[in-house]
Amino acid sequence: MINRKKIIAGNWKMNKTQAEARALVEDLIREIGKFDEAEIVLCPPFTALSAVSELLSPVPNIRLGAQNMHEAASGAYTGEISATMLRELYVRYVIIGHSERRQYFHEDNATVNRKTKAALAAELRPIVCVGETLPERESDKWKSVLETQLREGLAGFGDKELADIIIAYEPVWAIGTGKTATPAQAEETHQWIRKVLATHFSAAVAERIRIQYGGSVKTENAKELLSMPDIDGALVGGASLDARGFTAIIKNACLK
Ligand code: PGA
């Protein structure tokens, strides 16, 4: 069986001023120390990227990510940020198609596809988010919803592109609600995602790709979720804003 290194990313969303971000990162650097059994990624808001980047430059085991980007290289897109701008700040990952982007900013699978393509072209590693809503889960449509999100969001990519992509499965009903998918539910869904990837792309990709779980991950439930064989990490929102809690999630992720 292939060994997929766990990847834990903190999605700070629209939280933390630059000063607050600095304080949190200083605490995180202290708490996390040299721990490198998991890939660790921090995704602060755009305005704090530069400050966080500076603090992380001597820290090889904690990497920088962004929460979004625009697909164009440059141009008249007021309020937007390009992949090149992110690269200049040593950003290495970018979250694409988060359900909040889909819900509040009308991003669809085609947008996700274009942004993912642009991220890869700029050598950023996309964390592509997929997930179903509560009615879709309850009416048993989740399988087809996820299949469409993956097929359309990743359309046109081959094994080479997919090798640099991380998938985040985030059931919309579990984000910020305190409700988590049970480990068994999440595992079943991750297996389904691998099956879809094997069908539409290749068995090798399905086996190799890392799939994070996201949605109310916290210290108390991280270990159980992350011990499931097809859960390769976590995308953590609220709980990533606390240095101790986030560090405990990271360290728990690697306990057998
Ligand atoms: P949450 O958010 O951990 O606060 O539920 C996860 C996410 O939206 O990435």
Image (spheres, helix red, strand yellow):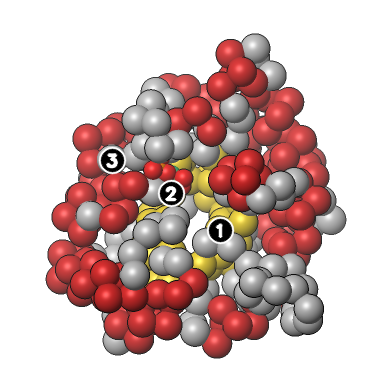
Cβ of disc 1 within 8 Å of ligand 1?
A: yes
Residue 94 screen position, x and y as percent: 56, 64
In three-dimensional space, the C-alpha distance between marks 3 and 2, rounded to whole angstroms, equals 10 Å
Of marks 3 and 2, which one's residue comes earlier in the chain? 3
Q: Secondary structure at mark 3?
A: loop
| Residue that carries the numbered disc 1 in the rendered image | 95
In the rendered structure, find residue 235 and report the number of the disc placed on it.
2
In three-dimensional space, the C-alpha distance between marks 1 and 2, rounded to whole angstroms, equals 10 Å
Cβ of disc 3 within 8 Å of ligand 1?
A: yes
Q: Quadrant of ligand 1?
A: top left
192 displayed left or right of 217: right
> Quadrant of the image for the C terminus?
top left
Hey, what amino acid is under mark 3? Lys
Residue 29 in sight here: no
Cβ of disc 2 within 8 Å of ligand 1?
A: yes
In three-dimensional space, the C-alpha distance between marks 1 and 3, rounded to whole angstroms, equals 19 Å
| Residue that carries the numbered disc 3 in the rendered image | 218
Hey, what amino acid is under mark 1? Ile
Residue 155 screen position, x and y as percent: 81, 51
